[in-house]
Image (cartoon, grey):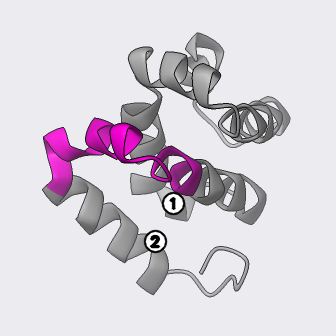
Amino acid sequence: MDALKKEKSDNFTQKNLMAALQKLTIRFRIQSLMINEGAPELLIDLLENHENISDYTLEYAAVCFMNFTIKKDQRKSFMSDYKRVVKVITNVLLGNSNIEVI
C-alpha cells in the first residue's frame, strides 16, 4: 500500500501495483488486511482523479472497488464517507467512455 501511495503519476509501476492489488482483493483474508491498511481510502483517492489515470489503471481500480464491496463486512469500510464514494463512482461511470470500466 505504501508503494502505491508514493506513486504520484500513472506510470508503469502504478499500473502494475494496481493490477497486483486487484488480484489480491479476491482473497478475503488479504482483503481484510488491505482494508485495515487504508486501501479503500487510497482507492477512492485514485478514482477521484480518474481523468489523470490510464484506462488500464482505471479498469483495475474499478474491479478492485467491486471486489471490496462483495462482502457485507467489507462494504462497511466505504460507509464512513459514503457521500464522497457515491460522488466518485457516479463521476467515474458518467465521465468515462471505456466500456470495460462501465
When the figure is inspected, residue 59 is found, relative to residue 102, above or below; the finding is above
Instruction: Mark 2 vs mark 1: give the one in front.
Output: 2
User: Which residue is denoted by mark 1 in the rendering?
Assistant: 50
Q: Position of residue 87 (x, y in %)?
A: 25, 67
Amino acid type assigned to the residue bearing label 2 in the image: Val
User: Which residue is denoted by mark 2 in the rendering?
Assistant: 92
CB of mark 2 within 8 Å of CB of mark 1?
yes
When the figure is inspected, residue 96 is found, relative to residue 31, above or below; the finding is below
Residue sitting at x 69%, y 82%:
98
**Which secondary structure lies at badge 1?**
helix
Q: Position of residue 58 (x, y in %)?
A: 64, 59
Q: Position of residue 45 (x, y in %)?
A: 40, 42
Residue sitting at x 61%, y 48%:
64
How many residues crowd mark 2 within 10 Å: few (<14), some (14–19), many (20+)?
A: many
Taking the magenta stretch, the answer to whether it contains residue 36 is no
* Extent of the magenta region: 65-82
Residue sitting at x 73%, y 31%:
24
